[in-house]
Image: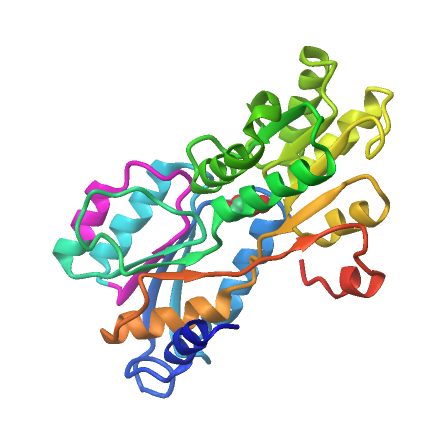
Amino acid sequence: MGAVALLVLAALLAPAGCGAGGDDPVRVGFSQLGAEGSWRAANTASIRSALTRADGFELTFSDDQRKQEGQVAALRRFIAADVDVIAFSPVVQDGWDPVLREARDAGVPVVVVDRSITSDLDGAYATRVGADFRAEGERAGRWVREHAPDARVFELQGTLGSGAQVGRQRGFRAVAGDQVVGEATGAFTRAGGRDVTAAALEAWPELDLVFAHNDDMALGAVEAVRAAGLRPGADVRVVSVDGTREALRALADGEIAHVVECDPLFGEQLAAVLRRVAAGDPVPERVVVPGRGFDRSVTAAQIEARAY
Ligand code: AHR
């Protein structure tokens, strides 16, 4: 870890004035975008377990069913309740400025969690805690360039317009865009990944690699390849993002070729940021959750040690 990263980490972990240790809990309203699969479930569990009363938080949690209108309504409820800080994982990246203006006008700070947003509003939010999606796409693209430079690639996209879909696609295309022969969205779900890959194998019978924007869709893609009478890992390779235990098992078994990690277990980092924001203390404008790549050298011990 570099010196700058260490300084940022130290600043985040330093105790802040409000919440932990104080009498009044930090009142947090958190809108989760809804259930999609194993990554999202692990992310919710990590955040819930870091924002407990014992940790100095009073958490109001809203599961917003993958609907932006539901998330906007939740944010408005949090503003009306005058919480100390709002946190939310935006299902898509555009369209948040009206409600963010309301929060800013009401003096309620906002922290963006996991997925990125676009905004033209000054001071729309204090910081974003989450992965660098573009870097994840680039990492996947580099693997394809190096290990499958002639592969015809089908890009299995996440929820269209989400920060994760846009960033991963941009990163991948910047490195291996000329290899992409087709694209469609599987909405980050296993069923979506399976159905869309089945249709893609008919539409583009020549394809030899699927780049899936997450592991759930990748596992669905593996099922579709097998159902089409092809061999995953041999006839059609699959490259994915997340690093769930199930995907790493498929990697070890040769059904998935490469996995780029996107770590959902950043509840403690988020808690540190929320304490500081609620106390009015400075935070870095971006808190990047790091990730790595996994290939077939992944060990059984690494797989079983995965917490998601
Ligand atoms: O925003 C992060 C993405 O959303 C993860 O890759 C995916 O699995 C999740 O649902």
Looking at the picture, does residue 253 appear above or below residue 300?
above
The image quadrant that residue 53 belongs to is bottom left
> Which residue sits at x=69%, y=40%?
146
> Which residue sits at x=72%, y=44%?
258
Residue 120 location, x and y as percent? 20, 42
> Which residue sits at x=82%, y=32%?
232
Taking 170 as reference, is 75 left or right?
left
Q: How many marks?
A: 0
Nearest to the observer: residue 207 or residue 276: 207
Residue 253 location, x and y as percent? 86, 46
**Quarter in which the C terminus is drawn:** bottom right
Nearest to the observer: residue 148 or residue 62: 148
Q: What color scheme is it?
A: rainbow
Nearest to the observer: residue 166 or residue 35: 166
The image quadrant that residue 195 belongs to is top right
> Which residue sits at x=76%, y=26%?
224
Magenta stretch holds residue 117: no
Q: Quadrant of ligand 1?
A: top right
Looking at the picture, does residue 120 appear above or below residue 14?
above
Residue 266 location, x and y as percent? 51, 64
Magenta stretch holds residue 102: yes
Taking 171 as reference, is 227 left or right?
right
Residue 107 location, x and y as percent? 16, 61
Query: From which residue to which does the magenta span run?
Result: 83-103
Most distant residue in the top direction: 203
Taking 47 as reference, is 31 left or right?
left
Most distant residue in the left direction: 105
Residue 35 in view, yes or no: no
Residue 197 in view, yes or no: yes
